[in-house]
Amino acid sequence: MLNKLYQPKFCELSPFPGFQTLAAFHHTANAPTRRVPQPRNAPQPRASRSPTRRGAVPPAAVPQSTADPRPAAPEAREGTEQRSRGHAHGEAHHEAHLHSVEAAGLRLPVRAHGHGHLQRSAQPAFLSRQQVADLIGADPREIIFTSGATESNNMAIKGVARFYKSRKKHIITTQTEHKCVLDSCRSLEAEGFQITYLPVQKNGLIDLKELEAAFQPDTSLVSVMAVNNEIGVKQPIRDIGEICRARQVFFHTDAAQAVGKIPLDVNDLKIDLMSISGHKIYGPKGVGAIYVRRRPRVRLEPLQSGGGQERGLRSGTVPTPLAVGLGAACEVAQEEMEVGGSGANWPFFPFPSACTSASLEPSYVLRAIGADEDLAHSSIRFGIGRFTTEEEIDYTVQKCIQHVKRLREMSPLWEMVQDGIDLKSIKWSQH
Amino acid sequence: MAASSRAQVLRLYRALLRESQRFSGYNYRTYAIRRIRDAFRENKSIKDSEKIEELVNKAKENLEIIHRQVHLLLLSYLRVVYISLNWLMLL
């Protein structure tokens, strides 16, 4: 029935769409390998790659086919590839990943003696860089692979701040940023930087006048996320980009939720740094990217020192399967955007989201937009993605209304509201 | 020539839809079916034979992908059942 090549070596899985888990399928040791019969005095294959070479691609990640690069059986072709993929909404990036690896595989120079010295331009990660760059209108040399948007945000904020710290010690951000941005800023405060956290209005957007007023002569960076993960608002990136460019201050945006859903062109919107997350665009978990502008050059102090990979800004071997998955996800996202959108313009209904739910505190984002304590505690967030259907939304809305009505019937507080009593004026007696 | 490629395209379309029906997940199933229908409808009136060939190849690749994913997701459900039974010490 199933070819044994399909069997996963290990996986942690959940059957529910919306839970994203990582399943790694390894090239099984028993996979048939094709060997071309060699004459006795044929040159021996050279070692495919010296382990100390910078930016080395692990040999297993690269299809080492000694025979026809397109073997007849599709199973055999898959078996020679090492892949990693995420589950739920997973086939989007499964398919994309395989597309990309196969496409890359076909470009690899295949030689009869099967050694694997590859030009850098033929490595799969190179193609992925191009795919990510195409999605945001950048140059592939400006894309750096990271372990996720959290690392990208840390790199952008701490890296830029520390590089320019001799002259510039001020950073502007907003109160509704992702935890990693706010925490990075907090750790910079401990290093002696000054941070301005801009408040947001009731609709979740920042006030551009306040932004302009917040600039100081020693401002090095402005960081505003493109689309908020909790309340779904889109900040006016274009305007912010213009303001920053006029004052020659670097503009960083955490575009994790926005990439692939709204058109983002880094040159059009005057963005200098952008964080991208793999799993938010239905790619693998554990990978992301950061866009770092080269003209005019944005300098950052690397967080991770080492062999100088990724332009010296992020040392460490690029995780090829993850990078390929990210690239392919970007390509699929671009197609989807052209076709008609993945519905990300629809609003979220906010709820304490994953990052802040460790505490009982209501979400700081909701508090920032002025929701009262009780409203913040009792809101629910519905996320809508590429695979959500209109039916599901209608059903959810209908059920919500039904249950809210039911609960209100039972609630004495609701009666009081209907009588016109302001709930905040109630004096609760002690028991 | 036109007749055979038309028949080929129709066969692919039917095969894609049939394979997508086998997804056990509601979201993937509806997405795949809708997407396939939209894509074929959108490209209905393309006349350039090179473009047609390119699209047909893409469709074939996608058919293979859907076929694999149907099996893999099925396998993953079985794996979850195995793990949970193991945990409950029913195995």
Image (tube, coloured by chain):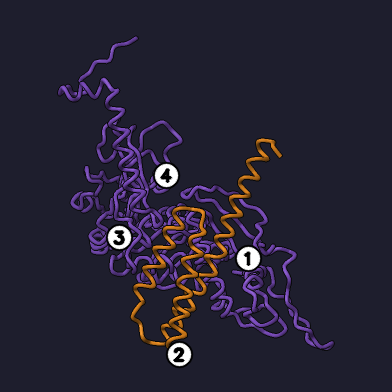
Please say if the residues under marks 3 and 4 sit with CB atoms less than 8 Å apart: no
C-alpha gap between disc 4 and disc 1:
36 Å
Image quadrant occupied by the C terminus of chain A: top left
What amino acid is at disc 2? Answer: Met
Q: Residue A5 appears at what percent x and percent y? A: 67, 64
Judge from the rendering whether residue A51 lies leftward or rightward of residue A22; answer left or right. right
Seen as rendered, the residue at the extreme bottom is B1
The orange one among the chains is: B
Judge from the rendering whether residue A278 lies leftward or rightward of residue B81; answer left or right. left
Q: Is residue A56 visible?
A: yes
What amino acid is at disc 4? Answer: Asp
C-alpha gap between disc 2 and disc 1:
39 Å
What residue lies at 37% left-to-right and 62% top-to-bottom?
A: A260
The mark closer to the camera, 3 or 1, is 1
What residue lies at 69% left-to-right and 82% top-to-bottom?
A: A67
Q: Residue B16 appears at what percent x and percent y? A: 48, 68
The mark closer to the camera, 3 or 4, is 4
Q: Which mark is residue A226?
A: none
Answer above or below: position of B55 versus A143.
Answer: below
Task: Tell me the subunit letter for badge 1.
Answer: A
What amino acid is at disc 3? Answer: Val
* Label 2 element class: loop
The mark closer to the camera, 2 or 1, is 2
What amino acid is at disc 1? Answer: Gln
Q: Residue A183 carries which label?
A: 4
